[in-house]
Amino acid sequence: MDIREASGTYERWLARHVPVRRGDLDLKHRLMTANAFSFFRATFYRWAQLWPEVCPESAGAPALLAVGDLHLENFGTWRDAEGRLIWGINDFDEAAVLPYTQDLVRLACSAHLAIRESRLKLSVRSACEAITEGYAESLRGGGGAAVLAERYRWLRELAIARLKDQRPYWEGMRALRTASGHAQPRVRRLLQAALPERGLEVRFAHRHAGLGSMGRLRLVALANWRGGMVAREAKPLAPSAWLWAHPGKNSALRYGQIVQNAVRVADPFLALHGQWLVRRLAPDCSRIELASLPRGHDEARLLWMMGWETANIHLGTPRQRRAVLADLGRRKGAWLAKAAVRTGDMVERDWRRWCKIAARED
């Protein structure tokens, strides 16, 4: 099937699992034409279809509980129970049992696309070497959370650069459109219970964020609390798009399992209530976009840390550690860079087809 048929089939499948908003899906379709990187972020379902065919030498690698939709902008910060600023992967909507190589190749492909679009300056080979070196070192050493309070000063400076003026973030929250009617009363109750104090005057709003999950209902509770605004978000979880592309018997949600098992520090404000994920929203508890990073940051070191953090997640399946290290050691030279280029070409072909379809329909 082509990209148009794949998108329609996937969206119908998704609508059977979670509430979707047609207007948000239409917006997602428009944003997918912006560039190949945006298209890539929005279409993990298509990647799940094509990656095993494009990279068969990687698709047979040892399997473990993996992120799935991993890319450069799936990293961010949160506060732990001690109030410390933590950096790491912050979205596991597409978590599934996959070859460990899937996460590495998808992360490397996102770097390759960013390099093509002049968002990164280093070479594809250097980017992939940084990712694999960080990944291997974390695996060998047992991993460890990126706690920015004491270590990783350079990463702390990258993370807090966007926190110097937090007013635009809260202005954006205030601008969210109020949710109409009395839909999802249970979800509203979950959001109210997650606020720091009961009895607050709450405004519920709709939010669209990200690209991969755009189209799913997101409900936000906004309230003023002791001198400032606070926010909580609820979003529904569906089985991974990998299971749409490769149907199997086990369609269980893996979000809670992957977060609990990972070798890192948890976000105490993140809670699962059946199919619904509730979390705190704040400038220091959000993903970091490439455009928000200060100029002159050390790209290779950042990608090394992304590889390290990927291993922190994979170490949540400890029985596969030795098998993964052995498989990684057998892979020759620039295997990841070659896979990044092949999958990047795959994404760009689909993106060009999507743009032609969109132009005909305008």
Image (cartoon, helix red, strand yellow):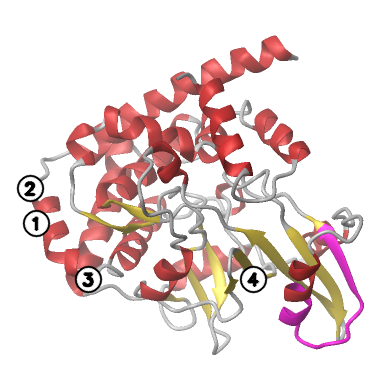
Task: Give the structural element (helix, strand or loop) at label 4.
Answer: strand
**Do tag 1 and tag 2 residues touch (Cβ < 8 Å)?**
yes
Residue drawn at (12%, 44%), measured in percent from left and top? 331
- Mark found first going from the N terminus, 4 or 2: 4
Question: Which residue matches tag 1?
Answer: 326
How many labels sit on residues?
Answer: 4
The circle on residue 330 is: 2
Which numbered mark, 1 or 3, is in the foreground of this view?
Answer: 3
Task: Give the structural element (helix, strand or loop) at label 3.
Answer: helix
Question: Which residue matches tag 3?
Answer: 318
- Mark found first going from the N terminus, 1 or 4: 4
Q: Quick check: is 92 in the magenta stretch?
A: no
Q: CA distance from mark 4 to mark 2?
A: 41 Å
Query: What is the three-letter code of the residue carrying label 4?
Result: Arg
Task: Give the structural element (helix, strand or loop) at label 2.
Answer: helix
Q: CA distance from mark 2 to mark 3?
A: 20 Å
Question: Which residue matches tag 4?
Answer: 279
7 to 177, vertically: above or below = above
- In magenta, the rendered stretch is 191-205
Query: What is the three-letter code of the residue carrying label 2?
Result: Arg
